[in-house]
Image (cartoon, rainbow, N blue to C red):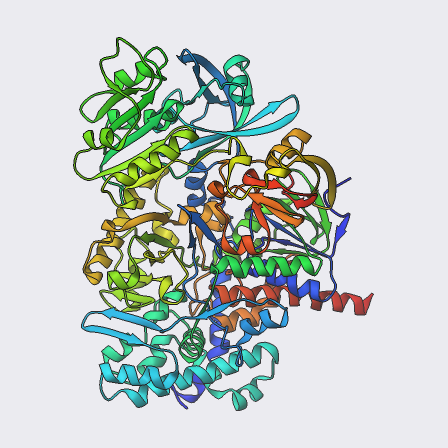
Amino acid sequence: MKIKGFLKDVGGASRVTQKRLDAFSNASDIPEMIDPIGEVKRQWHPDTLKLVVTDIREASKTAKTIRFEREDGEKLPFFYAGQYISLAFNMDGHIVCRPYSISSAPFEARANKPFVEITVRRSKGDGWISDYINDELKVGTHIMGNMGLGQFYYEPLRDAKNIVALAGGVGITPFVSMAKEIARGTMDANLTILFGSVSSDDIILKEELDKLSGERVRVVHVLSGDDPDWKGERGFLSAELIQKYSEGDCSYFICGPQVMYKFLHEEVAKLDVPDRRIRFEVFGQAKDITKFPGYPKEMSDKTFELSVMRGIKKDVIPAKACESIVTACERAGIILLTDCRSGECGFCRTKVIRGDYYVCPENDGRRAADKDFNYVHACSAYPLGDMTIKIPIV
Amino acid sequence: MSYYSDHYDVIVIGGALAGLSSALMLAEKGHKVLVLERHNLPGGIATSFVRGGIEIEAALHEMMSIGEKDNRLKVGKFFDDMGIDIDWLKVPEAYHASLPGLEVTLHPGFETFAKEVDAAVPGTYDKVLKVLNLCHTVFDSVNELSIHPMSKAKMLMNHEAFVKTAGYSTKEVLDTFDLPKKALDLLAPYWIYVGSGFSELPFTIYAVLMADYVGYGSFIPHKFSHEMSLKMAERAEEMGVQIEYRQHVDKILVRDGKVYGVRTSRGDEIHSDYVISSSYPNNVYTHMIEPASEVPKKAIKMVNGRRLSLTAFSVILILDKSAEELGIKDYSVFRGDTMDTDKCYEELAGLGPYHYITCICHNLANPDATPEGTCSYSITTLPRVDGWKTVKAEDYDKVKHRVANQLIEYMNDYLGFDLRDHILECVIETPMTISHYTDAWNGCIYGYAHTMDDHIVARLQTAEEEKFIEGLEFSGAHQISGDGMGPAVTNGRKAAKNVLDDMQRKGATA
């Protein structure tokens, strides 16, 4: 065969080898240290942030807004309004993570005095960390955090420009972030918030919401309690009410307590809108796992032995059947970091080497192959016997 | 008690396909191996994620070098030999080419492919088959020579086509066939999977690509590329490999020109005489070697003398109707305004608009890919890192959405409906996303560009001279075989073989 001529053809290999060596010897010997694409990534998704609490103020009579800044005062990462931050609290030497929707706006994280805020309501006894935040957290406390996380944000490619937010209680927070960004003109959408509260004297972030209301942001308060002087909407966020405040093509964004989700799943199903227009924020850690379908109730008061492998190191700790694997580790002082605590993000992906477990069906965000090989997201998996797991070294 | 043993035979940085292939091969020979992966799962970009309850493939379009069960090619055979049983699904066609004046679907198998080209451009059957046969001859030679090196004289005698085409670009060789432009256009679309325009792309690479894909077809794992990555990791662990996730290696420790271990960012110092790095040489030689004085100038010159290849930009959609309902007929579509690959390559240096695009609808090879009544549709372009290096963090979201919309609009024209009316879930993957999840240098997924200045034949010839630090090997797209998930496995095996050869040499002299 012939391409250009025998000698040229057979000399090809030597020719390209020489070319390559020439390219090297002609190259600069000054190292190129910067990876600009990696730099952009680090401004959006830096390593764990070292934060400090700089302000705590009332958001209602049962909730507080906590402001964090970076220890070094630098700008916080870019994020999308609606996303959350995962904070790692040090509770007497035990590291416990919790996710909170960010109630401040993305532009505030990049301002001259950059900050990020969360708003947390005191629970009625079942929220160890939310009570800690409301009652004990002090200005000056140092804390580690990861942000911006989660998928609960307006995506212009996918969502309608008219957003109808269905918020219950402290579920208002992601919408406050969105409202701030829209009011400032840096998010191109119209937001109608149907905000369910119990009584008019305990509406979270009411003042901020009043200030933000305007041409593109509308807030409709809906009270479920019997407030004799209330002139506005009453009851729950029913399909009828939602319909009343929907204009044109709308995307529905839903965030609130777990009890509200079941109700709203039924209400939005009554609306004549396609599935792609309905977006629920993640469910959150199950309040009572024994109430979920398929959970073996007879197990609920048992405690098992959980062997935890980190590298070649093994620890054996107790684990209650009614608490997630993550909770067992947190109680035992073993660090198992989480982000969403709803089984969605997979950050706490854990290998089960041995033993039976139950996965909360509402929070099973696992990959198909992971299910085949007994991987769980530890925040939504519960021991049903003695187990051995392997988790990352922290 | 420590989390690690005092000493490992080999430490592998990165638990993606290349690193896991290295680990598997070393473990098979009884060596004690530690794999440190920065993410919380194996695979690098060979992975999947779940959005709105639907699992979505992150990167894999089609896997080459697998072959049917009874006729495995090298990567398929490696998985079989290692006892890794992957549920491979065959991709039904080679591709649909949507080019100016051409709407042609081509299927694998040389004769079928040539017939289909002939049907679109009559009178080209013989010549196209001749091109493909030449590709196959070169492909056979490359496979044999990578196992049995031989003298130049013998090579010329037994591997004439390989030798005589090695010094030429794809364009130079294809020009000798005197094919009509439209037929050449139909032979070109796969170029993007090796990422250089035809006047720069070594014909050797083109030949291997075409022989493999067109000759034997391509495959995808049933449960996304995560099935492949996870099964590799599981098998490696079964064979005694220790894999630690979320461990970022900060430094490779070197003393007197010799590797002695690594340090992770949490501060663990772990010892080994061999380190295989999946991190780019660019990163290793500029940031990771400790002390930096152990990096010879020659290593920096080598890194600076090579050109980073392509990164990726994908709009991945889950649509709210089935492929059938939407009229999507092809698994894989290449759409372009021109099939002048040099022009396409030039355009990829910018930030769009892009006019050469690859689309995949997984459901057409894997009906279970998404829930009933939905389908997945991904639109990908593979830009060079150059344009994306200029994007500032504050403009990133704007640029990302501008490009995503342009790609969608480009495909809307072809599909005849607006994809945006059907989006259940959408994910925009950018070079920054790749950097975020894999830490690849500049988000580059293709290693170094295959060019006449950085030719695979030359890479093989000079490999020995590019070992600057004893005990340090590399594995990943930045190695000899270049980009792609199939070549990643081959690159990983090669790194392991280098370590094994060195161990043997030292064992023999000890």
Depth check: give the residue in front, B67 or A1. B67
Up the image or down, B70 lies above or below A153; here it is: below
Instruction: Residue lying at the far right in this picture: please name it.
Output: B510
Q: Position of residue A186 (x, y in %)?
A: 26, 30
Q: Residue at x 48, y 41 (%)?
A: A363
* Quadrant in which the C terminus of chain B is drawn: bottom right
Left or right relative to A120: residue A196:
left
For residue A60, which quarter of the picture?
A: top left
Of residue B433 and residue A313, the one placed in the foreground of this image is: A313
Please give left or right for residue B344 compared with residue A34 in the image: left
Quarter of the image where the N terminus of chain B is located: top right
Where residue A190 sits: x, y (%)?
A: 22, 31
- Residue B470 in view (yes/no): no
Observer-nearest of A201 and B410: A201
Residue shown at the point (18%, 73%) measured from the top left: B101
Q: Is residue B470 above or below residue B509?
A: above
Asked whether B147 or A53 is in front, the reply is A53
Residue B184 image-quadrant placement? bottom left
Kindly identify the residue that appears in the image at 53 percent across and 18 percent down: A131
Question: Where B349 sits versus B324, above or below?
Answer: above
- What residue do we see at 60% from left, 66% from top? B84
State whether residue B118 appears in this view: yes
Numbered circles on residues, count: 0
Residue B267 location (% of width, % of height): 66, 38
Q: Picture coordinates of residue B23 (x, y %)? A: 65, 60
Left or right of B431 on screen, residue A231: left
Residue lying furthest front = A298
